[in-house]
Image (cartoon, rainbow, N blue to C red):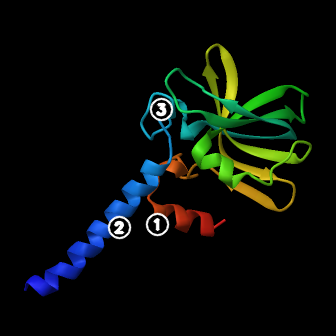
Amino acid sequence: MFKRLFFPVVLCLTLLSASLAFAGEMNIKGWEKGSEYDNLYDNTDRDVFKGTLVDIENITPMDGMAEGIAVLVKDKEDGEEVLVHLGPKDFVEPRIKDLRPGVRVKVYGVLIELNGEYEYMAAKLKAGEERKYKFRLTKDGTPFWSLSPEALKKEESGM
């Protein structure tokens, strides 16, 4: 009986430790699912806009949060520059290495008010014709950086 239980228990512990190691490698303080910042994302109020990427910036949306990445996008409709929050730096930076200013983008996300300013929290960003960057699940707004490595791999392979 011990031998039959040993393998499933070891497998479960290995998967659990891999998930914890994945989350432990990234600094996502303040960006976690259910955090004050995350609760600003209202998945029922999603919006889309098009524009041109102006700049990629480091941000700290709220005091005490880990550094994040945002893009400044010039809205195609009114020419206004909009700051679009992508996520924590440790998660986002490796995924957007090929993103450059000047490219036309389509931003999917939620408009939020933060510190008296209107900004976006991105769920997805399309750059040009080919590149897609996903940061949150469309169905419920769950941030990708809070997913297990297995769930993240499944979501990223489905792009």
Q: Kindly identify the residue that appears in the image at 7 percent across and 86 percent down.
A: 1
Res. 150 mark: 1
Of marks 3 and 2, which one's residue comes earlier in the chain?
2
Image side of residue 135 versus residue 19, left or right: right
Category of crowding for the residue at label 3, using alpha-carbon neighbours closer than 10 angstroms: few (below 14), some (14–19), many (at least 20): many
Res. 138 mark: none
Amino acid type at mark 3: Gly
Q: Secondary structure at mark 1?
A: helix
Where in the figure is residue 118, as x and y percent of width and height?
A: 69, 22
Residue bearing mark 3: 30
Of marks 1 and 3, which one's residue comes earlier in the chain?
3
Q: Secondary structure at mark 2?
A: helix
Amino acid type at mark 2: Leu
Where in the figure is residue 114, as x and y percent of width and height?
A: 61, 20
Image side of residue 5 versus residue 56, left or right: left
Q: Secondary structure at mark 3?
A: loop
Q: Kindly identify the residue that appears in the image at 28 percent across and 70 percent down.
A: 12
Discs 3, 2 touching: Cβ within 8 Å: no
Q: CA distance from mark 3 to mark 2?
A: 25 Å
Residue bearing mark 2: 15
Q: CA distance from mark 1 to mark 3?
A: 23 Å
Where in the figure is residue 130, as x and y percent of width and height?
A: 83, 62
Where in the figure is residue 97, as x and y percent of width and height?
A: 75, 52
Category of crowding for the residue at label 1, using alpha-carbon neighbours closer than 10 angstroms: few (below 14), some (14–19), many (at least 20): few
User: In the rendered view, would you say 38 is above or below 133?
Assistant: above
Q: Kindly identify the residue that appears in the image at 53 percent across and 68 percent down.
A: 154
Which of the 4 image quadrants contains residue 110?
top right
